[in-house]
Amino acid sequence: MTRRTFRDIHGILLLDKPLGLSSNQALQTARRLVGAAKGGHTGSLDPLATGLLPLCFGEATKLAGWLLGSRKAYEAEVRLGMTTTTADLEGEVVETRPVPVLDDATIEAALAPLRGLIVQIPPAYSAIKQDGVPLYVRARRGEVVDVPAREVDVYRLEVIGREGDTVRLLVECGSGTYVRSLAVDFGAHLGCGAHLTGLRRLWVEPFMAPPMVTLDELRDAAEIGPDQLEAFVMPVDAGLTHIPRVELDPEQTRIFGFGQPVPLGQGAEPGRCAVWGVDGRLMALGEIADDGLLRVLRGLNLPTA
């Protein structure tokens, strides 16, 4: 058996996570296949969920936390008439109720309160930590879990298909939104209960039309060689295309390279930006203050081309 060599690979791979694997299992499998010495992912998907899981390798891992707040879209399959302990297929059935005859107007009335800036109670079986312990660990111990409500943004929520007691929903939302909780609240508004039976993440900002790759495709590429695998890895700056680009002159590059703030002037647009040095190298994720002062949020140590 050939021993795999790990290398300093810097970039982002858009994985189509398969059913049944945790996000970390999917990450470690892809990392070993690619041969990346260091890797991380930007936000977990449950084992029962599939779809886009951006993986960061090398210096791109420094951006993983900043990508977590991105807008996301899902296709969700919801089964009406039954609630479960976990709000999805993994849990035990808590209650079953008959599903009433539903028309489009009734369904829309149940969905309408779930759009916009809403207050949501995450599932007890979730990875949210209290005192350092994930809630799902406490729930599995049989402890009574008090889940704090949170504000989340649901930008889009609409029916894209329906068959019997199963409804397919398109969900576009902000960070921290639990689609399982949306399913539960949808069923509660209809008066029959519901749980999530399928979930696929379609995109994550800034990857709005993602060229996803499967683990099987990575395995096939691994048989050919490293160059074939690295073709799937996008450059680090692919994760920053949704924010402004700032290019520094030689003196600004020198100052910024020491981690010192650089004055850009009052005309600079405040907010996060991708900072490029005079040598054409991505230096950092930066932030411009209201006074035009550019500071480092996350410095990058990428090799020169």
Image (cartoon, rainbow, N blue to C red):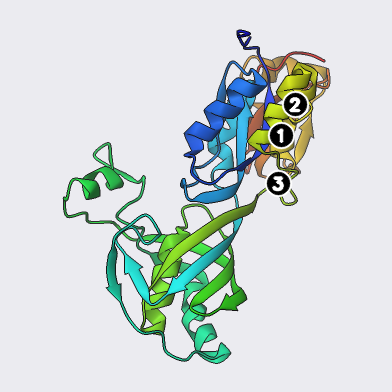
* Residue 170 visible in image: yes
Q: Which three-letter amino acid code belongs to the residue tagged 3?
A: Phe
Q: Say which element carries label 1.
A: helix
| Distance from Cα at disc 3 to Cα at disc 1 | 20 Å
226 left or right of 80 in image? right
Along the line of sight, the residue nearer the viewer: 72 or 233: 233
| Contact flag, marks 3 and 2 (Cβ < 8 Å) | no
Mark positioned earlier in the residue sequence (3 or 1): 3
Along the line of sight, the residue nearer the viewer: 241 or 185: 185
Q: Say which element carries label 2.
A: helix
| Distance from Cα at disc 1 to Cα at disc 2 | 6 Å
Along the line of sight, the residue nearer the viewer: 259 or 134: 134
Q: Which three-letter amino acid code belongs to the residue tagged 2?
A: Ala
Q: Say which element carries label 3.
A: loop
45 left or right of 230 in image? left
* Residue 299 visible in image: no
Mark positioned earlier in the residue sequence (3 or 2): 3
| Contact flag, marks 1 and 2 (Cβ < 8 Å) | yes
Instruction: Give the residue at mark 3.
Output: 207
172 left or right of 124 in image? right
Along the line of sight, the residue nearer the viewer: 113 or 19: 19
Instruction: Give the residue at mark 2.
Output: 221
Up the image or down, 21 lies above or below 28; here it is below
Instruction: Give the residue at mark 1.
Output: 217
Q: Which three-letter amino acid code belongs to the residue tagged 1?
A: Glu
